[in-house]
Image: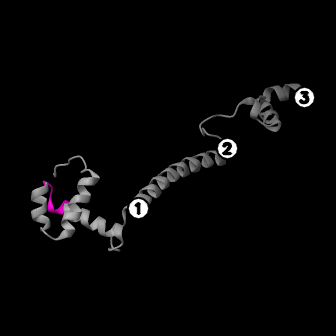
Amino acid sequence: MPRTRPPYPPEFRLEAIRLLRSGARSPKQLAAELGCSAQTLSNWLRQDQADRGERQDVLSSEERSRLRELERENKVLRANGKRSTARSTDRRSGSKNTTTQPTPSSRSPNSASKSSARDESPLTTESAS
């Protein structure tokens, strides 16, 4: 696994790009002098070219920043959308907890009369006649 280190200061990067653009040294020679890798210098140069509009195949720093901002916004919106979808599903089903039983006060008047008629035994109705 490659070693990671803190980012190089912006001033260091700018000076390295300036030296690389001068063409006095190859990226490999300059990397050895500056103590960084040739690939790092190439990446910085490529990004600098994109920022100057010299390359169209790479996003500029401004475009990268905007993309990160939009990705964060999308993440928040998706999370909120999942929450609201869950809430609307609960509302459609009539309750947040689908395992609750109806309370006696929530029964309709018809259901109360039906249950009392059901509770009467046949013996009590026959003996009343």
Mark 1 lies on a secondary structure that is helix
Q: Percent position (x, y) of residue 4?
A: 20, 48
Query: Which one is closest to the eye, mark 1 or mark 2?
Result: 1
Alpha-carbon span between mark 3 and mark 1: 93 Å
The residue where tag 1 is placed is 62
Question: As shown in the figure, which amino acid type bears the numbered disc 1?
Answer: Glu
Label 3 environment density (alpha carbons within 10 Å; few <14, some 14–19, many ≥20): few
* Residue 77 vertical placement versus 122 (above, below): below
Please name the residue that numbered disc 3 is placed on.
129
Residue situated in front as seen by the camera: 129 or 76: 76
**Mark 1 burial class by Cα count in 10 Å: few <14, some 14-19, many 20+:** few
Q: Residues within 10 Å of mark 2 (few under 14, many from 20)?
A: few
- The magenta segment is 35-40
Contact (Cβ within 8 Å) of mark 2 with mark 3: no
Residue under circle 2?
A: 94
Mark 2 is on which residue type?
Gly
